[in-house]
Amino acid sequence: MIKEFELAARPYRLRNRVQHYAWGTRNEAAFIPRLLGEAVEPGRPYAELWIGAHPKAPSQVLSDADAVPLGALIAAEPEAWLGEAVAHQFGAELPFLLKVLSAAEALSIQAHPTQEQAARLHERDPEHYPDANHKPEVAVALDGLTALVGFKPWAELRAVVSAYPEIAEFGGAMELADETALHEFYARLLRRALAEPEALEAATARLAHRLTERQAPLSETERLFLQLRVKYGGADVGLCSLFLFNLLHLQPGAGVYTEAGVPHAYLRGNIIECMANSDNVVRAGLTPKFKDVETLVEILTPQMGPAPVSTGEREAGWIIYRTPAAEFELSRRELAVGERVEIATGGRIEIYLVTRGSVRLHWADETAAYGRGASFVVPALLERFGLAAEDAAEIFRVRVPGRRL
């Protein structure tokens, strides 16, 4: 019992925290406050809504007695909240983190460490790597997402080297069509950018001049290059990365999974993002935040090929975005007016977010309504409940995948 909180077999509403990073949407375009039905503070960026138990921004569980951090409740009664199998596998911590992410401009060029790498990074630099966990993640577009994910296939990379000699000359030769050669090329590019920013400035200036003088229409990547060069300056190595990575345009409902070591950056859009419970990010460009080039070189996975875009798998009315991650399984469901669903939790914790419409939950002899923007946690104690759409609705659910317990 914490602050007179007595756990019962029922769902609990969550109060979640917003992160106001500079790249978030603002004013009329601010998605997160519209989702939550809250007033927008003029000029303030609304970047991420965190739903979970990460110590950086823990959700609070609301009850008649009090509002208590979800992580503290789980730590006090892990099996009752998580379920016996989940607690056995992951200990007394929620293994996943759910987010709403709203990007008006490019996030950093980044990658995430493996579990082993995360433990080393946290030990040697806990200020910049605040936990010892890895961070596999899946992103699902709400109204579209433009992103850079992974290195292009070899034929496209060869075309880049030919079309943009300024990048090829700065990074050095990349003659072999294998991942070792790609890793060496990108490592040289990053390290030289760190050691010789004036040379990178000169190379991007030459490319910018050539593009602006060219009569032919610019590609989307070329326009991004010119825009971001103005914002971050010509000595940012992320400008070169724009040409090397796959450029994606995800339609609503499409998702992409990013595993450890895969370089990526979200450029704009509103998404649902689910990941292991971590905030470890290794950055190397397009950001004013701390950049760690040597660590990114260390953890980089230089796989070539198209990004793994998925529209999910349909199963019993749910669209499930399956990934190799043991910590989470993200699902989405659209409900017609009056449609009712019976949900069996299997004795494991689940978290839900309503992104459209409203739903009413039924358990025992009780009910509770949740409108757009509301989220709730279902503890393992509640093994079965009903959910009905009061009007056309869309909900997201995250839980630990049962097949791996």
Image: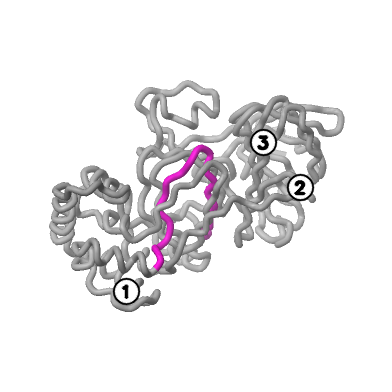
- Image: 64 above or below 7: above
To which residue does mark 3 refer?
Answer: 376
- Image: 182 above or below 308: below
Q: Is residue 196 visible?
A: yes
Image depth: mark 3 or mark 1 in front: 1
Residue type beneath disc 1: Glu
Image depth: mark 2 or mark 3 in front: 2
The percent coordinates of residue 140 (x first, y second) are 54, 46
Front in this rendered view, residue 292 or 259: 259
Front in this rendered view, residue 395 or 112: 395
**Residue drawn at 86 percent across, 33 percent down:** 364
Determine crowd level at label 1: few under 14, some 14-19, many 20+ residues with C-alpha closer than 10 A: some
Residue type beneath disc 3: Phe
To which residue does mark 2 refer?
Answer: 316
State the colouring used for the structure image. Answer: one colour
The furthest residue to the front: 216
The percent coordinates of residue 200 (x first, y second) are 18, 59
Q: Is 314 displayed left or right of 131 in the figure? A: right
Residue type beneath disc 2: Ala
Q: Considering only order in the chain, which callout, 2 or 1, is on the residue closer to the N terminus?
A: 1
Which stretch is magenta?
132-153
To which residue does mark 1 refer?
Answer: 184
Determine crowd level at label 3: few under 14, some 14-19, many 20+ residues with C-alpha closer than 10 A: many
Q: CA distance from mark 2 to mark 3?
A: 22 Å
- Image: 310 above or below 50: below
Q: Secondary structure at mark 3?
A: strand
Image depth: mark 1 or mark 2 in front: 2
Q: Is 281 displayed left or right of 359 in the figure? A: left
Q: Considering only order in the chain, which callout, 3 or 2, is on the residue closer to the N terminus?
A: 2
**Residue drawn at 35 percent across, 26 percent down:** 43
